[in-house]
Amino acid sequence: MTVSRNAWLMGAIAIFAALAPLVFPDYRTQIAMLWVMIIFAQTWDVMGGQMGYNSFGNIVFFGIGMYTSAVVQRDWGLEYFIGLGVGMALGSVIAVAAAAIMGLLILRMRGHYFAIATLGLGIAAGEIASGWDFIGAGSGMVTPLYPGHIDGRNLFFDYLFFAIAAITFLCLKWLYGTRFGLTINAIRDNEDKAEAMGLRTGTFKAFAWCVSAVFLGLCGGALGNLLGFVDPRDVAFAGPTFGVWMVLMAILGGKGTLWGPVLGAVVFHVTQEIFWTHLLGWQRVALGLLIVIIVVFFPLGILGWARERWPHRFGHRVEAS
C-alpha cells in the first residue's frame, strides 16, 4: 500500500470517526466498541503477529487498567474527569509493570508452552479478582456515574476510544519502522539466529509485551466507565470473549501487518453486531462457525489473501513467467 493510499485511508477513517457519532447517535456505544476492538487487535498483533509469540494473556493488562481506574475513582475523591484521567494513566503504568515482571518469568518459553502459560495467566487473574474483597470480589464494582446526559457520555467515549486507537496505530506504525520492528520480526522468523547475531532478544520481547500493556491499560481504564460496571470474569478478565476475540480479529485481517488487525476488527465487530441483531439465540453458534471459516479458508487473513491474489496492488513486483 503506497504512502498516498495510507494518507487517504487514514483521512477517511478520521472523517468517519468525527461524523459517525453525530450522524448515527443511536449507535454510539457500538461505534465506541468498534474502536475498542481495533485497540485489542492492534495490541495483540505486536506479540502474536509481528513477533510470533501467540499470547492469550493480554486480557490481564486490560483488566488491570479497568480495576485500577475504578479504584482510583472510588477512593481518591477526585472530580470525574480528573479521576478518569489519573485512573487510566495509573492503570497503564501498573499494566506495564505487570508485563515487565511476567515477561521476565515466562518469555523464556516458546511456541505452545508460551501460549498455554499466558492462557493460565488470564484465568488466574480472573480467579484472584473474584476472591479479592477490596475490588468487590465476585460481585464486581460499579464505576462513577458520568456527570451529564447519557448521550453526552456515549459521545465523549466515542471520541476518547478513537483517540486511543489512533494513538496506538500511529505509535505502532512508527515503532515497526525502527530497529524494534526489525528485531521482533527477526525473532518471529528465527529467534536462535537473531540471538546468534547479537540481538538482545529477551529485552525486545519484554519491551514488546510492555507496548501492548500500555494501550490495553488505557483502554481498560476507560471502558469500565462506559459499561458502568467491572466484573472479574465477564468484563475485566473476559478470556473466552475479549481475550479470544483479540486473537481472532488479528488473524482475520492478517496478522503481522499494520492494517490487517484494523481490518479484521472492523469485519469482526460488524459481523458480530449483525449476528446479535438477527440471530438472537444462535449468535454464539454463528460466531463459532465464523471462527472455523476464518481458520480454514483465511489462514493468512483477508489482507494476506488479497496480497496473494493482487500482489501488484500492494506494491509487489510480479515477474512474468
Image (cartoon, helix red, strand yellow):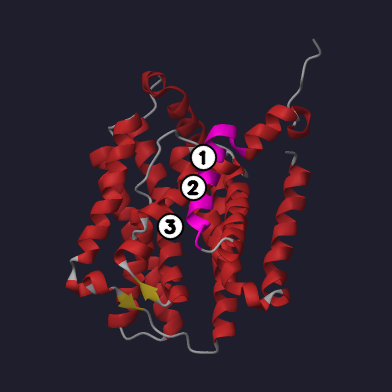
Of the two numbered discs 2 and 3 on the same chain, state the one appearing first in sequence.
3
Q: Which residue is mark 3?
A: 216
Residue type at mark 1? Answer: Val
Q: For residue 291: magenta?
A: yes
Residue projecting furthest to the right: 320
Crowd tier of the residue under label 2, counting other residues whose Cα lies within 10 Å: few below 14, some 14–19, many 20 or above: few
* Highlighted magenta segment, given as a residue range: 281-301
Magenta residues, dominant SS class: helix
Label 1, label 3: how far apart the Cα atoms are:
27 Å
Q: Which residue is mark 1?
A: 292
Question: CB of mark 1 within 8 Å of CB of mark 2?
Answer: yes
Q: Give me the residue at 38% from left, 49% from top.
A: 210
Q: Is residue 27 above or below residue 279?
A: below
Q: Give me the residue at 57% from left, 46% from top.
A: 261
Q: Give me the residue at 39% from left, 83% from top.
A: 144
Q: For residue 153: magenta?
A: no
Of the two numbered discs 1 and 3 on the same chain, state the one appearing first in sequence.
3
* Res. 178 in view: no
**Number of numbered markers:** 3
The image quarter containing residue 94 is bottom left
Residue type at mark 2? Answer: Gly
Pair 2/3: label in front: 2
Q: Compare residues 62 and 119 and report the one nearer the observer.
A: 119
Q: Position of residue 257 (x, y in %)?
A: 58, 38
Crowd tier of the residue under label 1, counting other residues whose Cα lies within 10 Å: few below 14, some 14–19, many 20 or above: few
Q: Position of residue 239 (x, y in %)?
A: 36, 53
Q: Position of residue 190 (x, y in %)?
A: 43, 22
Q: Secondary structure at mark 1?
A: helix
Residue type at mark 3? Answer: Leu
Q: Which residue is mark 2?
A: 288
Q: Position of residue 177 (x, y in %)?
A: 58, 38
Q: Compare residues 136 and 291 and report the one nearer the observer.
A: 291
